[in-house]
Image (tube, grey):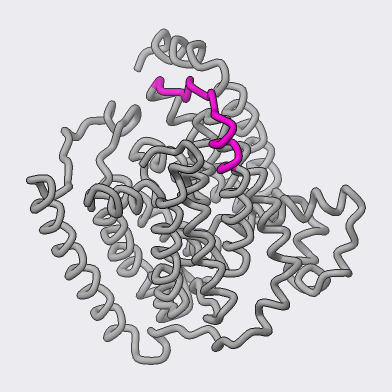
Amino acid sequence: MGVDVVKAILFSNRKVAPVLLGSLLLAGGLLISDSKMAVMFAVALVIGLALCHASFGFSAAYRHLFTGGDTSGAQSHLILLALTTIFFAPFLADETAFGSSVGGAIAPVGVGMAFGAAIFGIGMQLANACASGTLYTAGSGNLRMFVVLICFCIGVFWGSLDLGWWQSLPGIKPISLGNEFGWVAVVISQLIVFAFLFVLLRKLNYRRHGNDGQTTTSFSIEKIIRGPWPLVWGAVALALLNWATLVNAGHPWSVTWGFTLWSGKVAVLLGWDPSSSSFWANGFQANALKNSIWSDVTSVMNMGILAGAALASILASRISKNNKTHWRSFLAAVIGGLLLGYGARLAYGCNIGAFVSGVASTSLHGWVWILCALPGNWIGVKLRPYFHLTN
């Protein structure tokens, strides 16, 4: 693209340009102070661009599956899961990546975790997004999604205060299936499950719509830069970027801890005492509160995703222009955001941190998460018409 084209795009999207500019300036500061965080910001910038260009999400995919039998979104999730599992396995089995230690997204399974995943699923449909979807749609200029983001942060902080009680309910310790039964056997088993479900969904889509649900598009540099991308491009890109996160940060891509930290920081500014909470009083969480949000990997990556989505919208010239919201839709954004946040904290993550990164890490928790979140999504779909949200 020439300079005149770039200028035209920037000046035709005045609402997005300041967000992008501010984020990139902050990234410049990171580059000077911490090279690792600058790398993670850059990885997240591309994640935001990929999410936006491919319109890669989870809430719409589940909704289309339940209401119209469209399986294309769910098929892309299976591609993402399979590739991420393959990319993760050699490093997680060894617990090292290029000389540095790495660990998977492994979490406990219990009553509180299952309940959290279920209400997260309801929140997805009322909010119109999951955690990553909230970031990339907010970054692309959707004002309603900023309401969801704020309420998400409130909900996840609320959940952090209640987490101790939920953890006291029946449950089992974190289980890595790869460590328990052998990485080769578990990875092959997961890939077989993904392949079986993928073929099944393709057949269902063909029976319902006369096609397999997959779209193809010509490959070109301009298409990569300006989009739109087919879902499979998004799945491949996100799997590679999650792997890049694992080997650079030492853990898989996650989203909701960043929201938890932001809300905790605000609470401290408002006079809240972290020592009053078992979640915040000691360890990693206490140290994170004391340090800058720009020294936390997940927080930095969330900022990068916002910036990447803004960049994608500018390049594609498709900034969200219709931000009129019916009061019931606004109410759904508030309720949905609170459910997303509270549920994510109880369930140890969202579609990315708990489901994709969890299953790719062979965590039992990741499999249980999706089995609880899908019924929640179904309930959320049934509730949508009461809030003037179409299905």
Nearest the viewer among 373 and 226 is 373
Res 364 seen here: yes
At 45% from the left edge and 54% from the top edge, which residue is drawn?
A: 380
Q: Is residue 33 left or right of residue 117?
A: right
Quarter location, residue 367 = bottom left
Q: Is residue 183 left or right of residue 32?
A: left
The quarter of the picture where the N terminus appears is top left
Marks counted in the figure total: 0
Q: Residue 211, how many percent across, how many down? A: 9, 46
Nearest the viewer among 232 and 26 is 232
Q: Is residue 326 above or below residue 35?
A: above
Res 356 seen here: no
Nearest the viewer among 11 and 221 is 11
The quarter of the picture where the C terminus appears is top left
Q: Residue 262, how many percent across, how many down? A: 72, 50
Q: Residue 191, how many percent across, how many down? A: 24, 73
Residue stretch rendered in magenta on the structure: 317-333
At 49% from the left edge and 31% from the top edge, which residue is drawn?
A: 140
Would residue 92 be counted in the magenta stretch? no
At 54% from the left edge and 28% from the top edge, which residue is drawn?
A: 325
Q: Residue 383, how many percent across, how many down? A: 46, 50
Would residue 323 be counted in the magenta stretch? yes
Q: Is residue 239 above or below residue 113?
A: above
Nearest the viewer among 349 and 244 is 349
Q: Residue furthest front?
A: 386
Q: Is residue 99 above or below residue 202?
A: below
At 34% from the left edge and 69% from the top edge, which residue is drawn?
A: 85
Quarter location, residue 176 = bottom left
